[in-house]
Image: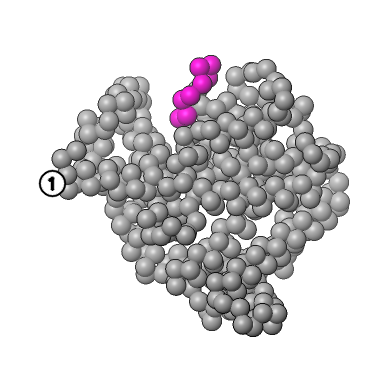
Amino acid sequence: MSHELAVYAAHEKFSKGRQTPESHPGYRSEFQRDRDRIIHCTAFRRLEYKTQVFVNHEGDLFRTRLTHTIEVAQIARSIARALGLNEDLTEAIALAHDLGHTPFGHAGQDALNHCMRDYGGFEHNLQSLRVVDRLEQKYAEFEGLNLTFETREGILKHCAVQKAKELGELGLRFIHQHQPSLEAQLANLADEIAYNNHDVDDGLRAGLLNFEALVEVKLFRDQYELVKQLYPELPKRRTTHEIVRRMINVLVNDLINSSRQALTEANPQNSDDARQHQDALIRFSAPMRQQNLELKSFLRHNLYTHYRVHRMTKKAAQVVQGLFTAFFDDSQLLPNEHHEKTRVAEKELGPSGKARIIADYIAGMTDRYAITEYKRLYEPLQLT
Ligand code: MG
């Protein structure tokens, strides 16, 4: 650890530990070990071929879930260091936060949730936890990655009370309405900073957004006017980058200053103390929260529902729905290993057991693998 930890930071010596106890990792901290296990897992590599807004094959310049994840980790680490929080834990949470996402981003998640409506539903956040707790099967001594409580707590951003009751100690905070660690709060906001800003950048690159409309949004307008004034002749791509990097910087600075102030006022004496506060102590100032909301709402109305995005969304939903229906109606269509799992799960838990194995299989697919599987199942001339 190259920087001083504040009293309210997570300390590994007070960690609630791993589900299967292990000896200390030696030259690394416990949270560094978590980070390393996440980077080496299969679901992490698949992030390269999954997307949130743009489907993977639409172009090579758009963010994928992997580059998004790296941006979140970078933003989160910088802020963690500035606030004296545990940078290793923050990084581990950030790197794992999207592991449970389906192919095709939110369209895929909504479609799969719809397919699973009678079998317990599908939620990407819970799925991320399921990936690290159970689905990664690599280690001899345990299922999943056997991560520390603190990393798992950070991955589970939200959870319905009913579900929380099934999760033991990890679910307690949703029942008692406590906050997660400050590191988890930070990773969550770093996610927002990253996607709002890179969606502006990708939206402009794709020609779905333009400066004229974006200047409605104060966060954008302030930086646009400044960059135009400083560099009136700058080409459009460089102007975009200058604006976006400044927007990120404004948000990061506000988050650091406002959180510092909240921490000074609340004066938590340790990490658990910080969890007891009714409000999150890692937070934007009220005006910046407002500006951030304005940007989010702009993106919702102008990018996520743009007809070109919507067409892809519709097709993505069709692919996920088609895969689920085919596998559920005839699970012999699944590759042997997954078929065997559905047989065991159905015997134990009935149709919802089978449905869950199919949802795991679909959620684990990359965009292009899902499209290929769909074609294999539905195009009569595809023989393999
Ligand atoms: Mg994310």
Q: Nearer the viewer, residue 203 or 359?
A: 203
Q: Nearer the viewer, residue 118 or 205?
A: 205
Q: At 72% from the left edge and 50% from the top edge, which residue is drawn?
A: 78
**Side of 293 where 119 appears, left or right:** left
43 sits left or right of 86 in the view: left
* Residue 202 covered by magenta stretch: no
- Examine the image and state in which quarter residue 107 appears: bottom left
- The residue range painted magenta reads 134-142
Q: Nearer the viewer, residue 235 or 48?
A: 235
Is residue 25 something that shows in the picture?
yes
Check the picture and name the quadrant holding the N terminus.
top right
Q: In what quadrant of the picture does the C terminus appear?
A: top left
From the viewer's side, name the closer residue of 293 and 302: 302
Which residue sits at x=39%, y=36%?
360
Quarter of the image holding residue 349? top left
Q: Which residue is mark 1?
A: 381
Identify the main secondary structure in magenta.
loop
